[in-house]
Image: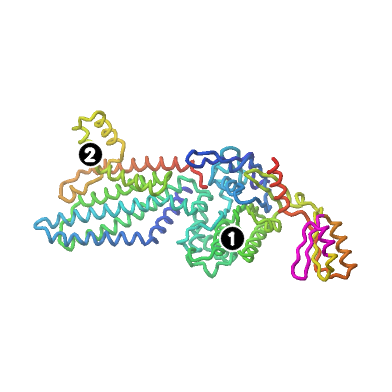
Amino acid sequence: MNAIRTRALHKTFRTGFWMRPVEAVRDVDLEVKAGEIFGFIGPNGAGKTTTIKMLTGLVLPSSGEAWVNEIPASDPESRAGLGFLPEGTFFHDYLSAREFLDFHGALLRIPKQLRRERIPKLLERVGLSGAADRQIRRYSKGMRQRAGLAQALIGDPQIVILDEPMSGLDPLGRKEVRDVILSLRDEGKTVFFSSHILEDAEVICDQVAIILSGKIVKQGYLDELLGQELVGSELVVEGISESLHEELGRQARRAVVQGNRFMFEFAGESDGEKALDRVRESGGRIRSYVPKRKSLEDLLLEGLEQEKRS
Amino acid sequence: MNSLSRIGVLAWNTYREAVRDKLLYNLLMFAGLMIASSILLAQMQIGKDERIYRDVGLGAIAFFGVLIAIFVGINLVYREISTKTVYTMLSKPVRRWEFLVGKYLGLLTLLAVEVGIMTICFLGVLVWKGSDFSIGLVWAIAMIYLELALVTAIAMFFSSFTSPYLAGMFTVALWITGHLLADLRAFGKNSDIPGLKELLEALYWTLPNLTRLDFKADASAGNPIELARVAMAAAYSLLYSLGLMVSAVLLFQRRDFR
């Protein structure tokens, strides 16, 4: 079953005095299976947020269709089982986190008694128990983000859409959000999140779609997209002679000197292994050797190249 | 039933937001001071004390009510959009019309409380000074409230598609024009300028005619106010407000929140 589906979803905005048309999203087809973590990847301005807003009823499509929980996204009932964290932390900041969650729970028509039970648990889950009765305007950015995340979960939704949930957070904050996303999958929920931070997506996603200039350029399961093939290797060594340094530098795609350490990045696996042998023979010390698989960054760059060519 | 529940939640939150805004308390304080100042003004006049208490009291309730209706009304929807708080609400199974009606009812609740507090101050002055309190005053205050409901609907209508500055200017312009429509119509009837009579006549019948809701002068002078006139004025205000809210919903329905 598809938790989210779009067919030829298209959005053209009219901007400026002359109302010039700008295509923000172009014929986007997505299929997100229930119970998956789906990463919606792309640089800023690629059309991620506009697509998400069409899924959540905030922006009306120019053409095409979208379904959430198999209900057309134009129907407000499609949002009954949906939790949404918008980009940025724009909430009713005159409310405390407890009041904020109570308000959103009431909008979802969750009975008062259930709200009373659920809110402290959610605050605990996002680490805001100690600040539950403090006005949100007195929160740090990370705390606001966590309050927003709790808001998205107040209805115990089956589908959670998070727009740039890790943007602007420190490494600890990002890890906490990643943990929440993973725990949601463990509970059988579908998580659809957008990000321009590729490392985060690579760590937690089952499936990804890469969007560039409003168009999906790659979509699929991470294993299929990235494959098992090695695309390079990275070698860090110490104690090698100047001549070996020059020799390896000629073979490497990139060479960097860090104090008494030398880092070489090789394009193929065999080049890296040959270099490894040369260092061993010369008596140099190997600090690390990392064979590299294709990354999301490589995929994104490929997509950008393709786009430039077309 | 679901809609009613969501509208109630949105109205309560709107009321709560406004109550936590310091501007409201400042306006209420000024209104109280103005009503109290009628005592000083009355001492400067001879023989017309009671009329001054009523004129100033009713005037203050209407003026400060309109200030709140316009300033809160034009920002009510705009602020939710500009601060992006609308995202978390409309991404729930909340219909856009429910959102607008909830905001509107929240502000009407606030205005009811505000008019109630000012009325208590007004009555306090009348009781303290031993002045008569007639049923006409009750009708006048009720009609002030219905005028505020109409002005709020005008503010929400404009703010559903334009900036608060423009919405504020349009609402103030309509409020002033609405109080002058009868005079403008009379002026048109006596004018020789071609087309002016027809234009002013058309404006008289299309723009919100707030003079229909103005019972202050009669109530203050102690003139009798017929129930039929009150009923007609109330129906006029409610129907006009409904029309504006329906128009606001139709405009809001197609809006993109970018």
Residue A73 magenta-highlighted: no
Instruction: Decide which of A83, A44 is in the foreground and name it.
Output: A44
Residue at the limit of the structure toward the top, as seen here: B194
Residue A303 to residue A280: above or below: above
Residue drawn where x is 77% and y is 49% of the image: A224
Residue drawn where x is 58% and y is 51% of the image: A82
* Picture disc at residue B182: 2
Q: Chain of mark 2?
A: B
Q: Which residues are magenta?
A: A245-267
Q: Residues within 10 Å of mark 2 (few under 14, many from 20)?
A: some
Give the residue pinned by disc 1: A168
Q: Amino acid at mark 2?
A: Ala
- Residue B209: x and y, percent? 27, 41
- The residues tagged by marks 1 and 2 sit, at their Cα atoms, a distance apart of 59 Å
Q: Chain of mark 1?
A: A
Residue drawn where x is 74% and y is 54% of the image: A295
Residue at the limit of the structure toward the right, as seen here: A281
Q: Amino acid at mark 1?
A: Gly
